[in-house]
Image (tube, rainbow, N blue to C red):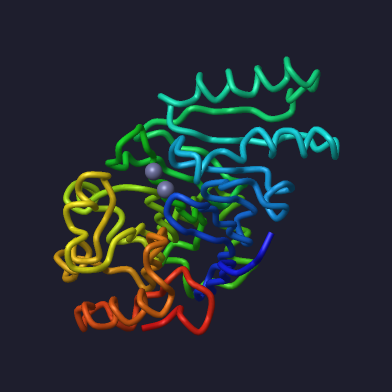
Amino acid sequence: MSDHDFVTITTPHLTIEGRSRAGHETWFRVRELNAAFDIGRCPDQLIATPHIFVTHAHLDHAVGIPFYAGQRQLHRMTGGHVYVPADAAEGMREILAIYERITGASFAEVEVIGLAAGDVVRLGKTHEVRVHRATHRVAANGYEVIELRHRLRDEFAGCDEREITELRKSGVSVTEEWQRSMLFYTGDTDRGILEQNDALYKSEVLMIECSFIIDGHEERAAKYRHIHFDDIAAFAGRFENETIVLTHFSRRYSRSEIRDEIRRRCPAVLRDRIRLALPEPYQRL
Ligand SMILES: [Zn+2]
Ligand SMILES: [Zn+2]
């Protein structure tokens, strides 16, 4: 397969690799989390990834699930987790069961887990993923990654290690929980998520779809429940994110057309924070 659309996006805390074009294929792997968002057609890079958060059942995001299960079976990997919207979970299990039946395989080591808005999945000791509803043509989840740490309470900041140990032994709680939203991944969605969801504006990195960008495609965006760049521009003042990655561009547009058109339309307040999920030299405005 050609790596024509393969992208690597680095932010201060994350290395994100993947590819994303509307109707063709979307997946992203976040190295630091050992997790992926959407699976596309299941590229080799995702087979060893134990946690795959699929936003919705459309083929360009989800068709790789049976291949993932089969490859992990082949390589005897245990503990694969595929998260899908709750409404799609039973159907996805049926698809895997049919493949097991017609190929004589067993996918027992891959678990399909249905998630709905408000659900939380723990990722190791230091992260959790919160589920949000995304507004789209089919049941769709957005996923938010939270970093969880314990840090010393302010009042003990001046203490040395021995004092801290003594305090701890005497039963004093010296640390407090600290949380940071490090990534919000919308998957396919429309303007509704910008109207209804507060969390996406506050995450350090926002990955948001932006299927349509040019004049005359606004109605198409609304009809197929996707975002047009003008929707993002309309909410420009609300984004507190350090980095905003635009994904899922329609294949109607060339890479240079995408960059030039967004550069022309982009409000100044967003310009330096926007990254396009396109290979270099098309990533920055
Ligand atoms: Zn899509
Ligand atoms: Zn879709």
Q: Residue at the spot x=62%, y=43% of the render?
A: 51
- Tag count: 0
Residue 182 visible in the shown view? yes
Residue found at the very far right of the displayed protein: 75
Q: Is residue 61 left or right of residue 142?
A: right
Q: Residue at the spot x=59%, y=66% of the render?
A: 163
> In this orientation, which residue lies closer to the viewer: 19 or 10?
19
Q: Is residue 166 above or below residue 10?
A: above
Q: Residue at the spot x=58%, y=53% of the render?
A: 168
**Image quadrant containing the C terminus:** bottom left
Q: Is residue 200 left or right of residue 95?
A: left
> In this orientation, which residue lies closer to the viewer: 52 or 259?
259
Q: Residue at the spot x=50%, y=74% of the render?
A: 11
For residue 216, what is the image quadrant?
A: bottom left
- Residue 86 percent across, percent down from the top left: 43, 26
- Residue 152 percent across, percent down from the top left: 49, 63
Q: Is residue 261 left or right of residue 58?
A: left
